[in-house]
Image (cartoon, rainbow, N blue to C red):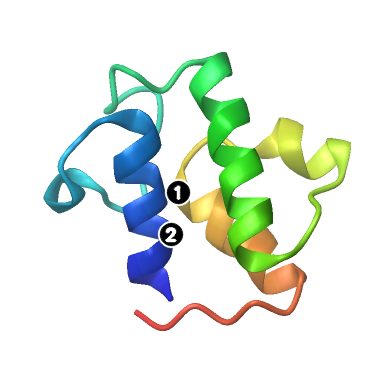
């Protein structure tokens, strides 16, 4: 499932999936802005059928944060 998360990041941020890493975020992905982050949040919620809390949403700074919050919602991502 990690690959599905990476696919979503790649699609929304318009970067090759090969460039996505756990520490990928606004420092390494030029298109990672507040609007694209909102789109990514929405796509991840729809794909994994969860809802992030406001606090969770505000704390997401990179792909690793998404993985942590997905795990907290019972979504196990296989590396």
* Residue 22 appears in the figure: no
| Residue position for label 1 | 63
Q: Which one is closest to the eye, mark 1 or mark 2?
A: 2
Q: Is residue 75 left or right of residue 2?
A: right
Q: Is residue 71 left or right of residue 1?
A: right
* Residue 65 appears in the figure: yes
Image coordinates of residue 73 in percent, x first then y, are 77, 70
Work out which quarter of the rendered image holds the N terminus and state it.
bottom left
Above-or-below relation of 55 to 31? below
Q: Residue furthest front?
A: 46
| Residue position for label 2 | 5
SS category of the residue bearing label 1: helix
Q: Quadrant of residue 49?
A: bottom right
Q: Earlier in the sequence, mark 1 or mark 2?
A: 2
Callout count: 2
Image coordinates of residue 40 in percent, x first then y, are 53, 38
Label 1, label 2: how far apart the Cα atoms are:
8 Å
Residue at point 58%, 82% (across, down): 76
Q: Is residue 28 left or right of residue 16?
A: right
Residue at point 34%, 79% (across, down): 79
Image coordinates of residue 4 in percent, x first then y, are 39, 65
Above-or-below relation of 71 to 41? below
Q: Quadrant of residue 61?
A: top right
Residue at point 86%, 45% (across, down): 53
SS category of the residue bearing label 2: helix
Structural crowding at the residue carrying mark 1, measured as other residues with C-alpha within 10 Å and reported as few (<14), some (14–19) or many (≥20): some
Are the two marked residues, 1 and 2, in contact with CB atoms closer than 8 angstroms? Answer: yes
Image coordinates of residue 32 in percent, x first then y, are 41, 23
Q: Return the residue nearer the eye: 68 or 6.
A: 6
Q: Is residue 15 left or right of residue 53?
A: left
Structural crowding at the residue carrying mark 2, measured as other residues with C-alpha within 10 Å and reported as few (<14), some (14–19) or many (≥20): many
Q: Quadrant of residue 75?
A: bottom right
């Amino acid at each position: 499932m990690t690959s599905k998360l990476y696919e979503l990041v790649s699609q929304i941020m318009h970067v090759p999936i090969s460039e996505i890493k756990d520490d990928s975020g606004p420092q390494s992905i030029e298109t990672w802005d507040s609007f694209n982050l909102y789109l990514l949040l929405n796509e991840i919620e729809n794909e994994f059928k969860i809802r992030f809390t406001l606090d969770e949403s505000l704390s997401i700074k990179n792909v690793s944060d998404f993985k942590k919050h997905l795990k907290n919602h019972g979504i196990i991502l296989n590396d």
